Amino acid sequence: MTRFVSSSPDSRLLPFPWDTPLADWPVKLLVALPRGLSRHVVRFVQVGDSVYAAKEVVEHLALHEYRLLTDLHRLDTPSVEPIGIITERRDASGTPLDPILLTRHLEFSLPYRSLFSPGVRQETVSRLLDAMVVLIARLHLIGFKWGDVSLSNILFRRDAGAFAAYLVDAETGELHDHLSDGQREQDLEIARTNLFGDFLDLQAGGLLQPPLEPLTLVDMILTRYQELWEELTGVEEFSGSEMGRIEGRVRRLNALGFDVAEMDIRTDDGSSRIRIQPKVVDAGHHQRRLMRLTGLDTEENQARRLLNDLDTYRFRTGQAHVDEAVVAHKWLTEVFEPVMQEVPEALRAKREPAQLFHELLDYRWYKSQREHRDVPIVEAAKGYVRDVLEGLPDEALNREALLPVVESAKLVNPYDPSQGYVVEGEEPPHDPWEDGVEDVPEPSGYLDIAALRAKAAAQAS
Ligand SMILES: Nc1ncnc2c1ncn2[C@@H]1O[C@H](COP(=O)(O)OP(=O)(O)O)[C@@H](O)[C@H]1O
Ligand SMILES: [Mg+2]
């Protein structure tokens, strides 16, 4: 008797031939999509409108991976989504078969072999490595020791101008409350060995050409990881006259794609030295926290900036031990509202309050940098109104003016808006990453990247 383990059972899975080894499934049930190297038999199947990845694997590993992927998903970590496990399979003669782990196919994701092609640009590789480093650091931050970092266990997707990396294989993973430096070191040691092998393999296949070289690439990954980790978790110490450094740290982390929940700011008794250590968190956190503390309903990035200002205010005014809700109320009445009062009635339609405050913080940051002093917020507000706000068109008008342009323009790739619009008479830049689709076996037309691109090209011409 076949058994389904899943948090949301799906009756469409019942008709599949669970009594047949995955390797022998009829081709008509399978979807041809690019795939990385694997130890186990992995196939893609179509279930309704979705495509699932099926992996045949021994029971304790299947259960372990299913549970870990569920945890990673709950923690908002970039990883594939678990669907369920099919256990207690037997073939026609009654011989037991290994369970099958189902995960949702990560749409438009590509394994590394599709990304590396002869003549791949160094910049593309560099962006891939960055995405990988960010993924490893994110996993380590939540206490996940991967145990098997390798190119085949990572999937890549485009993310605006960059790449985003996802974990695809959690079989060897362990989730702890916190990773020690030793545990992280072990994970990095495995990464070094595996990645070096993966790059050697690419080189042997002629896909990696000078100046790209296995040892350099591996060293680059590890160096960048150390830099990122230091930026994410390192303690910074400075004197009380360098307050801008708190905001500087936050800006650097934001630029790296991380959100800062709180700053642990301490002063040594009797000295003017300040120590800061950021706490990095998941998205959506700031919106909720700002709403709870101040009732302001904002976008995530705006909320982050406002909260960072609130945290800095808390420290500046010596209220580190006061309840944060109390401080938030004070910040609203002593900082946020006085700033809003600086904005003349006639100019208020130009920016939403949270956006205005966010731009004002930028304005103050640059002014403080230029003038080597901490510019007070109300002074900055007056300057911002005069130098910036007065010259801006109304937001509402602005949006209307933009609309027809966007509607008439044609996307370079309708499946990837991040590539922007077609400019008449201009060849789109050539990106070898886009070429890496040749090794897709027999396009099925469904969710197949090469086929979708071909369709889009046909429609466009
Ligand atoms: N949910 C998924 N979405 C996209 N690709 C997947 C998915 N699951 C597996 N794959 C592809 O299959 C390959 C092998 O899967 P993996 O879980 O790493 O198997 P193994 O445990 O045998 O190494 C991956 O490299 C990836 O390319
Ligand atoms: Mg794998």
Image (cartoon, helix red, strand yellow):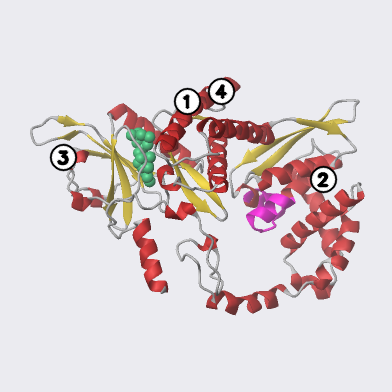
The vertical placement of 322 against 457, above or below, is above
Q: Are marks 3 and 1 in contact (CB under 8 Å)?
A: no
Mark toward the start of the polypeptide (4 vs 2): 4
Judge whether residue 153 can be spotted in this image.
no
Q: Are marks 1 and 4 in contact (CB under 8 Å)?
A: no
User: For the residue marked with disc 2, what is the amino acid?
Assistant: Tyr
Residue 20 got which mark?
3
Residue 193 got which mark?
1
What's the distance in space between the residues labelled 3 and 2, CA to CA? 64 Å
Respond yes or no on whether mark 1 lies under 8 Å from ligand 2.
no
Residue 449, how many percent across, how many down?
Answer: 38, 57
Q: Residue at x 35, y 44 (%)?
A: 35
The vertical placement of 427 against 308, above or below, is below
Q: Residue furthest top?
A: 182
Q: Residue at x 15, y 39 (%)?
A: 19
User: For the residue marked with disc 3, what is the amino acid?
Assistant: Thr
Residue 432, how many percent across, how many down?
Answer: 48, 53
Respond yes or no on whether mark 2 lies under 8 Å from ligand 1.
no
Q: Residue at x 39, y 34 (%)?
A: 67
Part of the protein shown in magenta: 288-306
Please tell me whether residue 296 belongs to the stretch shown in magenta. Answer: yes
Mark toward the start of the polypeptide (3 vs 1): 3
What's the distance in space between the residues labelled 4 and 2, CA to CA? 37 Å
Residue designated by label 2: 313
Residue 185 got which mark?
4
